Image (spheres, rainbow, N blue to C red):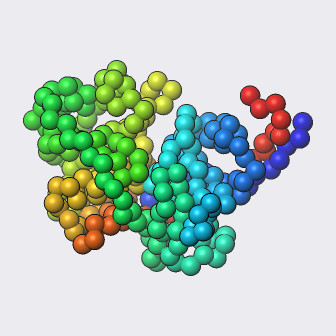
Amino acid sequence: MMLTPYPYQLVNVFAESHFGGNPLAVFPQADGLNDLQMQLIARQFNLSEVVFVHQAEQLSAVKKLRIFTPDYELPFAGHPTIGASFVLHRQLGLPDQYVLQTNAGLIEIYHQQKQIIFGLNTDIQIQTIKDDPLLYAKLLGLQPADIAQIAWVNTGSQQLLIQLNSASAIKTCQIDTALFHQLVQQSALYVWFEEHNQAKVRLFFGSNGAVVEDPGTGSAAANLGGLCIKNGLTPLNWKITQGDEIQRPNRLTLSVDESETIYVGGEVIAVGNGEFFVPSDNIK
């Protein structure tokens, strides 16, 4: 059997320490891989996402990103975009501002000292849910009084955002798995609370029939920025805390300027590298 080696790098995104952040595998030279191979590799790594870098199809972009969870491909995700940017900036000697292509569109990338930031200026799709919050309170293991706002938001990846009324509600929420699969399905659930420009958040998604907590989620932070635009809360500059409940502290920045461009950023730490051997035929 012929085996082709593909180099990869392991990085922690939104990390302030070596064992913090959201783990990510980046394949910077993935042009020889097909959809099935990328999906199987993502399943092998069993991280929240793996990102594969290809030649861009649009002239303004330096590369194209394909992002896979263990179960399916995503059009866009924040921490793979930032992690891939970290690797490409170092490997290719890119400038501190450039464009990457994703299946959700073109993404502006900025390198500012240790921070890597993506910028979005896109149509914001929001569907506010005005139903009785009792069902959603049960979803979270909370009381209806704990819930402030419920909305589906999409600035590149659709997620269900639920604003809670206290930081303690964020910490104590417990997801009802059956209700999650009924209400959220293959999207993700993002709970958030903000006070004094400090946001405490958690994100949950389904995987193999279970509900998993993500340590750090850039796409959800972007959706939060989009919701704040619609709620008239911009311009803003927030710091986001995520992942402490699962011992993977993540620290993100979220800002929205006067032009309603959304910026999400964080630091990246390289933690390893290697080669993944891919069989050239009879993949199952």
Find the residue positioned furthest to the left.
145
Instruction: Specify whether 147 is left or right of 83.
Output: left
Rendered image quadrant of residue 182 = top left
Q: Is residue 23 visible?
A: no
Percent across and percent down for residue 118 are 44, 65
Instruction: Specify whether 159 is left or right of 272.
Output: left
Q: Residue at x 62, y 71 (%)?
A: 90
**How many numbered tags mark residues here?**
0
Find the residue positioned furthest to the right.
1
Rendered image quadrant of residue 251 = bottom left
> In the displayed structure, would residue 196 be above or below residue 183?
below
Q: Is residue 139 visible?
A: yes
Quadrant the C terminus occupies: top right
Instruction: Specify whether 87 is left or right of 226.
Output: right
Q: Residue at x 39, y 36 (%)?
A: 187
Instruction: Specify whether 35 is left or right of 122.
Output: right
The foreground one among 127 and 278 is 127
Find the residue positioned furthest to the front.
58
Quadrant the N terminus occupies: top right
> In the displayed structure, would residue 111 be above or below residue 163?
below
The foreground one among 5 and 155 is 155
Percent across and percent down for residue 93 are 64, 76
Q: Residue at x 83, y 47 (%)?
A: 4
Percent across and percent down for residue 179 are 31, 23
Q: Residue at x 13, y 28 (%)?
A: 132
